[in-house]
Image (cartoon, rainbow, N blue to C red):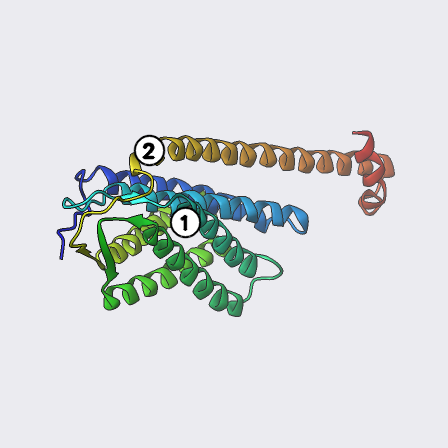
Amino acid sequence: MAEVHHFAFGWINPTLSYVLSFLGCLLGLVLATRARDVTGASRVRWLTLAAVAIGGTGIWLMHFMAMVGFDVPSTVVRYDLPMTLASVFLAVVIVAIGLFIVGMGSPKVWKLLIGGPVTGIGVAAMHYTGMAAMRTGGVISFEPTKVALSVVIAVVAATVALWFALVIRGASATVGAALLMAAAVCTMHYTGMSAIRVRLAPETTTIEGVAPFVLLMPISILACVVITALAYATVGLTVQMENEREDEAAADKVAERLAGRPQSAAMLRPRLTRHL
């Protein structure tokens, strides 16, 4: 078996991975909180944005940043680009499925018990799809016990994350939940990575694929753009909702003043809101 390094650059990669996962999970929880306050198409929009934040940044970007620190000194490591992109798509879609299961309609325990395992198994599938994209001068295999443990961690972490998305409110609680989610995602990743075994091929062959550092720059830029866009959308839509609430409150006051009795406010408010 070839020697395998998971921290080729020391603690730089795991630290950056944790920070990225925390930011993605934090933004995703904020977006999920917004989704609970609205219904219909607005809820779908918020949950979709939350899936992009958690799946794309909190999970997949953390995964890839950690993978940059993976090295096999006896051979070069390359990545299959189509399979790597497929793992991104899988991460976002799977998280979206889980969020829509628990987030649409009224909250139910059975939704959480279904959405959690579905999302966890999907996250594990994303992780091993990303690892299957690796190309080395040998054969990669996995230790079954550690693979099973990583899947269990993924299911538990996903269930807890969806529960957080349903109930968490308040700044300090949201930050604390994001810290725990990021820790769970990183634990799952490195547990799965510890299962890797590489048996070198007897003959040297050309290894096709893209070097991890070639992918690092465009992916980092894309991550910054996505995080900024999601944060901007969160602030913009929140301001819009606050303005609408203020308009309704102002319409209520004007309607009560004109009607002389509070029960007439509901009848007059729609007309006044249009003018405001």
215 vs 240, nearest the viewer: 215
Q: Residues within 10 Å of mark 2 (few under 14, many from 20)?
A: few
Is 191 drawn above or below residue 29 in the view shown?
below
223 vs 15, nearest the viewer: 223
Q: Residue at x 48, y 48 (%)?
A: 89
Q: CA distance from mark 1 to mark 2?
A: 16 Å
Residue type beneath disc 2:
Val
Element class at badge 1: helix
Q: Residues within 10 Å of mark 1 (few under 14, many from 20)?
A: some
83 vs 255, nearest the viewer: 83
The spot of residue 256 in percent (x, y) is 81, 38
Answer with the quarter of the image where residue 153 lies: bottom left
140 vs 12, nearest the viewer: 140
Answer with the quarter of the image where residue 101 lies: bottom right
Look at mark 2 in the image and give the residue it sits on: 214
Q: Residue at x 47, y 31 (%)?
A: 225
Instruction: Say whether residue 121 is left or right of residue 200.
Output: right
Element class at badge 2: helix
The spot of residue 119 in percent (x, y) is 45, 60
Q: Could you tell which of marks 1 and 2 lies nearer the N-terminus?
A: 1
The spot of residue 179 in percent (x, y) is 34, 47
For the image, the number of numbered tags is: 2
The label shown at residue 204 is none
Q: Residue at x 71, y 37 (%)?
A: 249
Look at mark 1 in the image and give the residue it sits on: 83
Q: Is residue 257 visible?
A: no
Residue type beneath disc 1:
Met
Q: Is residue 80 visible?
A: yes
The quadrant of the picture occupied by the N terminus is bottom left
